[in-house]
Image (tube, rainbow, N blue to C red):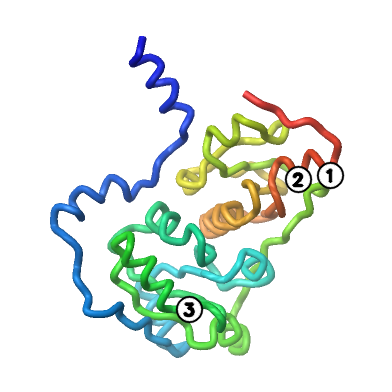
Amino acid sequence: MELDRLDTVLAGLGSFPSYFARLPEVNRRGPHLYGSPPELPALDLEAFRAAIARGAAIIDAPPAAEFAAGHMPRPLSIPLPPAFASWLGWLVAPEAELVFVLDDDQDPRELVRQCLFVGYECLVGRLDGGMRTWTDAGLPTSSIPLLEPDAVLGAVIDVRQRNEFAAGHLPGAENVELGSIGDAVVPDGPVTVMCGHGERAMTGASVLEANGARDLRVLVGGPDDWAHATGETLEVE
């Protein structure tokens, strides 16, 4: 009986970060000790594009609203902070080379600290000048519209954890936890991606877009905001 209750509790918690499975071996080996955190080099556009060409993953760290307005092809949106390290460790292969897009007012040292915290050390550098350098060069960009809570359009993908979703969600929404979003099958037509506030949703939308999905939108806010704006009732499980 106790085991049945434990299984029930665990089933309601949702998935856990994939990097947790790597931590025992990392802890067994012990940390890589740095006298001081390494610098994150500023890359010119040629070096940045060369890193992408050889397979480096692009991590876009500015706020979700800036990513929505314009981003380069195939980046992963993970705003810095608060949960940067967790979602980096969950969504990116541990051996991947990483290049970054930052705002001028974001601290590269904080980004390096969070990367090292979850064992990512192949930090190639950041694009000098950020998105301004990319757009000034006339290189292609994409955007993902932001929707207010009363303007949800098309199918809804909710990327929150299972227990969050069960506590209250939009009627007809599909729950695909952010950690599993890479395996999602996206329906035809417009799709609204949502979470509790919008940051996880933008991360999920960036993964879907990189996998070829189009006609994506991200909800600003969460289910409670939708219910307040529309006067409709959330579904619970």
Q: Which residue is mark 3?
A: 107
Q: Position of residue 220 (x, y in %)?
A: 71, 54
Residue shown at the point (40%, 52%) measured from the top left: 90
Label 2: how many Cα within 10 Å (few below 14, some 14–19, many 20+): some
Q: Are marks 3 and 1 in contact (CB under 8 Å)?
A: no
Q: Position of residue 173 (x, y in %)?
A: 67, 35
Label 3: how many Cα within 10 Å (few below 14, some 14–19, many 20+): few
Q: Position of residue 207 (x, y in %)?
A: 52, 56
Dot label at residue 229: 1
Q: Classify residue 166 by image quadrant.
A: top right
Using residue 99 as the reference point, say whether residue 81 is left or right of it.
right
Residue type at numbered disc 3: Asp
Q: Disc 3 and disc 1: Cα gap in Å?
A: 36 Å
> Helix, strand or loop at disc 1?
helix
Question: Which residue occupies the foreground of this view, 208 or 66?
Answer: 66
For marks 3 and 1 on the same chain, the one whose residue lies earlier in the sequence: 3
For marks 3 and 2 on the same chain, the one whose residue lies earlier in the sequence: 3
Q: Which residue is mark 2?
A: 225
Q: Position of residue 150 (x, y in %)?
A: 83, 47
Examine the rendered structure and indicate whether residue 119 appears above or below residue 125: above
Q: Are marks 2 and 1 in contact (CB under 8 Å)?
A: yes
Residue type at numbered disc 2: Asp
> Helix, strand or loop at disc 3?
loop
Residue type at numbered disc 1: Ala
Examine the rendered structure and indicate whether residue 16 appears above or below residue 237: below
